Image (cartoon, rainbow, N blue to C red):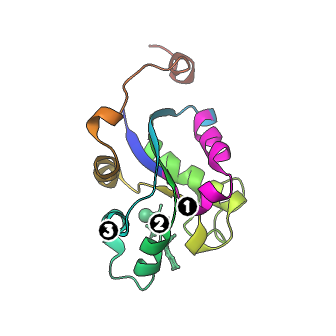
Amino acid sequence: MERTFIAIKPDGVQRGLISEIIERFERKGFKLVAIKLVVPSKTFAQKHYHDLKERPFFNGLCNFLSSGPVLAMVWEGEGVITYGRKLIGATDPQKSEPGTIRGDLAIVVGRNIIHGSDGPETAKNEINLWFKPEELTNYTSNQEKWAYGVN
Ligand code: GTP
Ligand code: MG
């Protein structure tokens, strides 16, 4: 089953939005398979955002990501990579639709509270970067047969 890497950035953690964000993924029917609170080093943040290293905001972005606790998670479900991004909303909260996480809970692009992998390859790489294999769980959740049906 498809998996994606989702992280609540230091602003989301500090603003007390952890439960609100987790609730949105849970209520959709997605399954949490890994979770931990970590303060990434700047070097680690640079690895996570390596695709953006030429951008003018790269240094500030990496300083910010490493400035406090990040809630790192792996969520599983059919279409979770693409739909996770829909739940999150557009990068700039001024352009995110109401009803999305960034649309409802954030104001500026540099403090958009949450990260989500943008494709299957990125999801695989980010999960491997943030989690050891033994930190990823495999289980059947009670709600799966109701969320997906049988046959
Ligand atoms: P992530 O899920 O965090 O990867 O965001 P994204 O995929 O929606 O956007 P992208 O990967 O292009 O950018 C990564 C992060 O860099 C964004 O979430 C923003 O926090 C930040 N960022 C992107 N564009 C800008 C910008 O123009 N200015 C500033 N200050 N930050 C930006
Ligand atoms: Mg991105």
48 lies left or right of 89:
left
Residue at label 2? 65
Residue at label 1? 10
Q: Is residue 9 above or below residue 51?
A: above
Q: CA distance from mark 3 to mark 2?
A: 11 Å
Query: Mark 1 or mark 3, which has the lower sequence index?
Result: 1
Q: Is residue 13 above or below residue 83?
A: below
Q: Residue at image x 57%, y 54%? A: 88
Crowd rating for badge 3 (residues with CA inside 10 Å; few <14, some 14–19, many 20+): few
Give the quadrant of residue 44.
Answer: bottom left
Q: Is residue 22 above or below residue 141?
A: below
Mark 1: which secondary structure? helix
Q: Residue at image x 60%, y 63%? A: 11
> What amino acid type is highlighted by mark number 3?
Thr
Q: Residue at image x 56%, y 74%? A: 110
Residue 43 drawn in magenta = no
> What amino acid type is highlighted by mark number 1?
Pro
Q: Is residue 101 above or below residue 53?
A: above
The N terminus: image quadrant? top left
Residue numbers of the magenta segment: 7-26
Q: Residue furthest bottom?
A: 56
Q: Residue at image x 56%, y 20%? A: 143
> What amino acid type is highlighted by mark number 2?
Leu
Q: Are marks 1 and 2 in contact (CB under 8 Å)?
A: yes
The C terminus: image quadrant? top left
Q: Any mark on residue 43, and which?
A: 3
Mark 2: which secondary structure? helix
